[in-house]
Amino acid sequence: MEEPQTTSPHVLLFPVPAQGHINVMLKFAELLSLSSIRVTFLTTEHSYRQLTLHSDVLPRFSLFPSFQFRTISDGLPLSHPRIFAHHLTEMLHSFVSVTKPLFRDMLLSPHFSSDLTCLILDGFFSYLLDIDDDFVKVPTFCFRTSGACSTWTILSIPNLIKQGQLPIKGEDDMDRILDNVPGMENLLRCRDLPGFCRATDPNNDPILQFIMSTFIRSTKFSALIMNTFEDLEGPILSNIRTLCPNLYSIGPLHALLKTKLTHETESLNNLWEVDRSCLTWLGNQAAGSVIYVSFGSITVMGNRELMEFWHGLVNSGRSFLWVIRPDLLKGENGEIEIPAELEEGTKQRGYMVGWTPQEKVLCHEAVGGFLTHSGWNSTLESIVAGKPMICWPYGFDQLVNSRFVSNVWNLGLDMKDLCDRETVAKMVNDVMVNRKEEFVRSATEIANLARQSVNPGGSSYANFDRLIEDIKILSRQKIPVLVNN
Ligand SMILES: O=c1ccn([C@@H]2O[C@H](COP(=O)(O)OP(=O)(O)O[C@H]3O[C@H](CO)[C@@H](O)[C@H](O)[C@H]3O)[C@@H](O)[C@H]2O)c(=O)[nH]1
């Protein structure tokens, strides 16, 4: 029997306001709502506006009467472009000075202080709570939107610094193997570490220190929820459990949601307008013939990189579907002159759009491979669709993910730190033709494991049920939000 609504647990979710975080945490919110948990989804005014403008979240979530959106200011004017690649430091300062106190006041307001069962905070937002001085006490779970491989790498950085393995000593040092990351022996090279590890003075680099401290802080929360699965990252998850034993691996979350939903829906949570014409174009292409190209929601590139990719794709002779987001280009001065051979090659075999329904595109039978920036959501979506990858990581966790895609899971090739037309054309042909059989074999095996994990009897399915049970137990304990003065 359904629990009466007044006693059902109430959970507050707060993701970082970026596509790769909001998308997955809304899917998580949908899963919680399907399990009779009351959800308040907190997001910034700007993201809420984009979401409601370009996706069907309002009608979709209206099916859950106890679900509500709440908004909070990020301290920037609504007209601010908020491009992470350009404005990260400004945005971080604004979150700390404006959002943090507003968030604290919100937690202490009567609506939340006596009714909230637990807070599920994006791992990158761990600095919004002062856990160390116990100012606000509420059972808090950390939701990590990136994979275990990159999480464990970042948690290992303090040791790498202590052992003198960091800083990286220049370009000649990039291929040195880091032999002291437990569970990743003989695997990671200096160039595979997240971009901020390239700092010359790690002990005094503000970005590196800030990111390390948010990761370490989030292991001190009551629990860690991760969008991954045991068959993919089991040994690494065991290492993370040494720091945070209460860990729920519940991914791939988009696939778990498909299992739990009784009706067919796309669950699109996009901040950009989707162009569906690409599905019609794909419908006219031969099975496995198209390389899908997308660099996620944050990557930016210069004119030179754009032209190298474009030439490489055209020269490969393969068909391509390429997402060119409105803000993909760095905004360098000067018009780009498009050579006639690119125009002609694109007319014959290419299609470009501003934003796609990516999960659907990846599952389309015409798509044979994915040229990706290796964001964690894209990686998992490609894994579930059973599609091999060419990885061109841009930064953050992507540099670790791409190493795992190529050297651990054998799902494709890593193009890290390279951007020339010859490499692009060669890798496209290697993944789509020359080494296709090998990569498709591994991709099919891992896709099957991913599907098993989210079906009844699978590890993620069971872990999600355990999480729901634990939230219900917390709710019966009725721990109020406390302020320690
Ligand atoms: O045309 C497109 C392109 C992308 N997507 C979706 O957008 C999301 C993109 O997420 P992700 O692949 O994770 O990339 P980013 O947007 O770059 O995500 C940020 O957040 C991720 C999760 O923490 C990190 O792994 C990345 O490094 C970080 O850049 C995915 O769900 C895609 O399906 C679309 O729907 N249509």
Image (cartoon, rainbow, N blue to C red):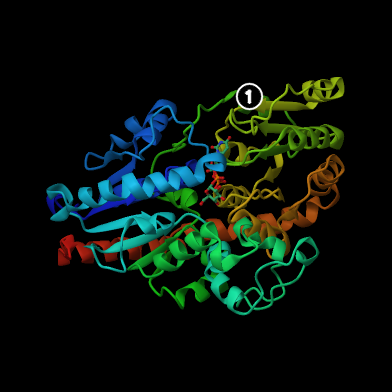
Determine which residue is flagged by label 1: 280
Above or below for 393 versus 72: below
| Residue closer to the observer: 104 or 264 | 104
Q: Residue at x 82, y 25 (%)?
A: 342
Mark 1 lies on a secondary structure that is helix
Above or below for 398 versus 294: below
What is the quadrant of the N terminus in the image?
bottom left
Which quarter is ligand 1 in? top right
| Residue closer to the observer: 257 or 350 | 350
Q: Residues within 10 Å of mark 1 (few under 14, many from 20)?
A: few
Instruction: Tally the marks.
Output: 1
Name the spot of residue 224 as percent of width and height, x first: 40, 65
Q: Is residue 46 left or right of residue 296?
A: left
Q: Is residue 71 visible?
A: yes
Name the spot of residue 187 as percent of width and height, x first: 70, 70
Name the spot of residue 274 as percent of width and height, x first: 53, 28
Three-letter residue code for mark 1: Thr
| Residue closer to the observer: 373 or 175 | 175
Q: Residue at x 32, y 38 (%)?
A: 73
Above or below for 136 versus 20: below
When asked about the image quadrant of residue 65, the answer is: top left
